[in-house]
Image (cartoon, coloured by chain):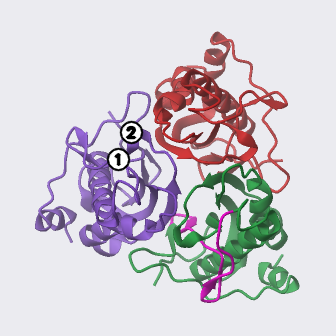
Chain colours: A purple, B green, C red
Amino acid sequence: MSVENNLKALGITLPAAPAAVAAYAPWIRVGNLVITSGQLPWDGDTLGFTGKLGDELNEEQGYQAARLCAINAIAQLKAAVGKLDLIRQIVRLEGNVHSAPGFRGHPQVLNGASDLFNQTFGDRGRHTRTALGINEMPLDAPVQLSVWAEVLTGAEDTQPP
Amino acid sequence: MSVENNLKALGITLPAAPAAVAAYAPWIRVGNLVITSGQLPWDGDTLGFTGKLGDELNEEQGYQAARLCAINAIAQLKAAVGKLDLIRQIVRLEGNVHSAPGFRGHPQVLNGASDLFNQTFGDRGRHTRTALGINEMPLDAPVQLSVWAEVLTGAEDTQPP
Amino acid sequence: MSVENNLKALGITLPAAPAAVAAYAPWIRVGNLVITSGQLPWDGDTLGFTGKLGDELNEEQGYQAARLCAINAIAQLKAAVGKLDLIRQIVRLEGNVHSAPGFRGHPQVLNGASDLFNQTFGDRGRHTRTALGINEMPLDAPVQLSVWAEVLTGAEDTQPP
């Protein structure tokens, strides 16, 4: 398996790992875990989508927003471990969906992230998931996604620059 | 201590561990930690409760909903480790309560989960907790609960089927 | 580096680590990680601030509330490890902001916690962060903050009393 090849087959070029705001780090490694900060649907320098699901955005747009969050998260994991094949297991996706009153399609939206991890990491992409609706999101982002990944034992220890 | 005996004394029969939606796994083990996906108050094939606290549901109903989430979470832990006595410590309950405007009884609701872990796991059931109000919840569930548990060193490593 | 000296230089006296409600513990150690329960902006026996950001409270008040949460979290870490210099790395701040409709200043509010960790722990204070808006918060608190910290290998294992 090569995660990089799977990304290429999907036509995905990883962006530079988005910098976090100055006061915090985009990822931290602790033991064999890499934990990311909350990832937003950045598409270059702007958010690919903004607004609430069930109001400005529909489920398909939410799916694409969650997929963008996942692409940014994978870029963070690559920055953390160097080669994505050094990841043993995606452990958890924490999915938070900016929700207008009455919105219930959180699972469909977050499948945009889950599907991409499954497509690119195969069995190693299986993960637990939380799915919550949030009333007000930083930067009016529709989705915020945090990822935990387990690194293969023996992979070099690293910290963000 | 036998967690299984304590469950029996409370008249609780663990259900089959609820399957997660296809795109993700109900639990993952990483090192000595087992992490569950967000658990809902399933009672067989249907949710035992739906709606918002402070609107359709009162605190006592919320307590029972949180207890149901905990029963499902314990079923996941059993699926993960085989015997519940192999759990060294419940580490964290992440409690999310579907809240109507002005609802403030999150702690009382989540005690439905905390009390059950304390009753069944004894000292090993002591846990940290987060308690948040959520404006819109998947499936209109009143509570979503995620659990972290530490497994005794030496317990066989496992992954979900 | 001495974290205690840095706190003193900032004029901060750590309070007694706030007790959690009876049903759960204020912190748990698992392996080399210490995890706190959700910390509120306690100032002695009362909350230093209550209400929603963007309604009763402005960003500067939110910043101070997040800083108070961080002071309480540091008190919990000290209770957990004895000497704060035994902390190798702050791993994660989970920041939840009680938000009125349209509030978008979550990052500015949570910098009140991030800045304090950076000022007192130096490089060891760098952390990942999640920043979410919450519609209804327990006790009407404006901020709830959970912290993960990695303990130096070899530091004595402990559990809450």
Residue under label 1:
A40
Q: Nearer the viewer, residue A99 or A150?
A: A99
Give how far across and how far down residue A139 sits, in percent.
Answer: 38, 39
Asked if marks 2 and 1 touch (Cβ < 8 Å), the reply is yes
Q: CA distance from mark 2 to mark 1?
A: 9 Å
Any magenta on residue B38? Answer: yes
Q: Amino acid at mark 2?
A: Leu
Q: Is residue A65 visible?
A: yes
Residue C30 visible, this angle: no
What is the secondary structure assignment of the residue under circle 1?
loop
For image coordinates 65% across by 78% down, the residue present is: B72
Q: Which residue is mark 2?
A: A139
Q: Which residues are magenta?
A: B30-52
Magenta stretch: helix, strand or loop mostly: loop
Q: Quadrant of residue C67?
A: top right
- Chain identity of mark 1: A
Kind of residue indicated by mark 1: Leu
